[in-house]
Image: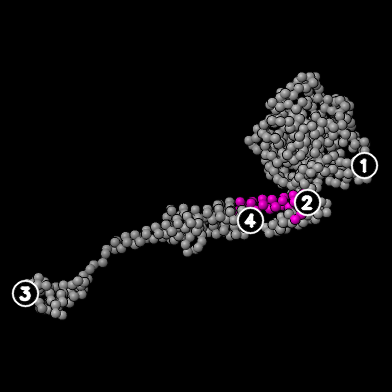
Amino acid sequence: MLQARDWLCILLLVAGALPGGILHAQNNQATLPESTFERLGEGSQSEEYDLDLTVPLQQPAPAEDSAEEAQRKQQKAIARQLAAARKALQEGRIDQPPSDCAWTHYRSVLDIDPQNEEALQGLRNVQQAMVDQALAIARDLDFETANRTLEDASLVLENPEIIEQAREEMVEFRADYIEELEIRAVNAMDSGDFALAERQLIELIAMGGVDTIVSQLRRRLEEAKVYGGFKPGQIIRDHFINQGYWTPESVIVLAGSFQMGSSAFEEGRVENEGPRHRVTFRRGFAIGKTEVTVKQFRQFVNKTGYKTDAEKQGFSTIYNHHSGRLTNRDDVNWEQNYEGQDARDDDPVVHVSWNDATAYVQWLARGTGKAYRLPTEAEFEYALRGGQKTRYWWGDDSPSSLVENLTGEHDLSRGRRQWSTYFEDYEDNYWGPAPVGSFGANPFGLHDIAGNVGEWVRDCWHDTYLRAPADGSAWLNPGCKLRIIRGGFWASSPDQARAAYRLSAKPDRRDARVGFRIARDL
């Protein structure tokens, strides 16, 4: 059994191991405080002490305290990463550099807490920012970098819809830009600026994947260098080969693009004017400055002996001043005006059918060696609009100045009749067709295109524009039974004078309201 002295030595050794222990150094000897010695001395001769010296003097924290500490550390780490992510996002470090960007910091948060809403929203913001960045790069025409950026954005989150939408926007923008370059190149050729056309071709080549377009434009450029270029609004006419007369004047309309038809919200819209669709002309064309006149048509008849449908069938339709209606009359043809009286030389020729108009332009083509024809429906509307998007080429309402031969509120017939539907506060002093060119031109330099007489175009009639050509060419079907009349005429209501308005008629139809103008390929 250990004696009291032995216990004292053990306690002294243990106490010396404690910080700030109970030993005091005095003359290099360890001594105990008196109180301690006294406590130990009490009962030392007769009591036994059962001391377990293996028990540590300091117990560890409970297990739950360690978990709480770990959680606190975790929350601090999340807070630090979120703060770093916010700062990176604010400073534009979206995905670069990899060690200190918003993407990296938000991912680090989700590695700790996969359901952290701020980090999830942050990654959505990162992805959207990268998508926006890709679109901006595409608009700067660096499509290769834009595609790489979009691929990186797809790795941020599983969100295929936003990526696919952005990809479609980029494809559409690229296609539109290629189309714009093509139109610029064609316009440069048509205007004789071949150096500019070459620069546009180089840009197209740099786009890649447009070899067919470039090849076609190369051929076109060589042709333009041989035949010379045209300028928009330039007036041309062609001389008949080995003959002493000329074609009617035409106006150059350069390549371009427009929305054909009317929107669902346009006042006066008819269902056959839709769906509205984009048409792009990759080549310019020429279109008659005015409608073909009686004098010009007479030249054709005199040279060829051609017989019109009115002459073959023995009648046409005229306006009757007494009844105020259109009525059939025998022995009326292209030589008469809208009332059935002798026409003036500069009146637009009427009482001509689509067949007659087609025969006239074919005669021009044979005589000149140039590609004369009737305008396509798309060409006519494009030329009529003159670059405008409104209901009429002058605006959306009644004109404020003289523009066309229209149904004006103050117009009077010889029988003192007035129009029942009309352009308010408008008067042009004509009841029936006016001599061609009596009014000013539209923005493309064309006269009488929205009024005076309706005009035959080349296309077959279709009830809608579903599957209509997008390149401005004529929409033809073998053996089609109806053709198209475009443009307002002297008796059209305001709704019928709109740029999008269209009518159908049999190809042998003729009356006092319809004539035509020519067109020519360049």
- The residues bearing labels 2 and 4 have C-alpha atoms spaced at a distance of 27 Å
**Counting other residues with Cα less than 10 Å from the Cα at mark 2, is it few (<14), some (14-19), or many (20 or more)?**
some
Name the residue type under label 4: Leu
Marked residue nearer the N-terminal end (3 or 1)? 3
Check residue 244 in the rendering and tell me which mark sits there, or answer none.
1
* Residue farthest toward the bottom in the current orientation of the protein: 28
Mark 4 sits on what residue? 141
- Determine the secondary structure under disc 4: loop
Which quarter of the figure has residue 406? Answer: top right
Figure check: 421 above or below 295:
above
Q: Is mark 3 on a helix, strand or loop?
A: loop
Residue position for label 3:
46
Residue 346's place in the image compared with 369, above or below, is above
Q: What residue type is labelled 1?
A: Gly
Q: Return the residue nearer the eye: 29 or 15.
A: 29
Residue toward you, 65 or 218: 218
Residue 52, image x, y percentages? 18, 73
Q: Residue drawn at (72%, 51%), measured in percent from left and top?
A: 184
Q: Earlier in the sequence, mark 1 or mark 4?
A: 4
Could you tell which of marks 2 and 1 lies nearer the N-terminus? Answer: 2
Amino acid type at image mark 2: Gly
- How far across and how far down the image is residue 57, in percent? 21, 70
Separation of residues labelled 3 and 2 (CA atoms): 128 Å
Q: In this view, does 240 lie above or below 198?
A: above
| Contact? badges 2 and 4 (CB < 8 Å) | no
Determine which of the numbered discs, if any, sits on residue 192 in the image: 2
Q: Give the range drawn in magenta.
A: 167-195
Instruction: State which quarter of the image contains the N terminus.
Output: bottom left
- Residue at disc 2, secondary structure: loop
Give the colouring mode of the picture.
Answer: one colour
Label 2 or label 4, whichever lies nearer to me, is 2
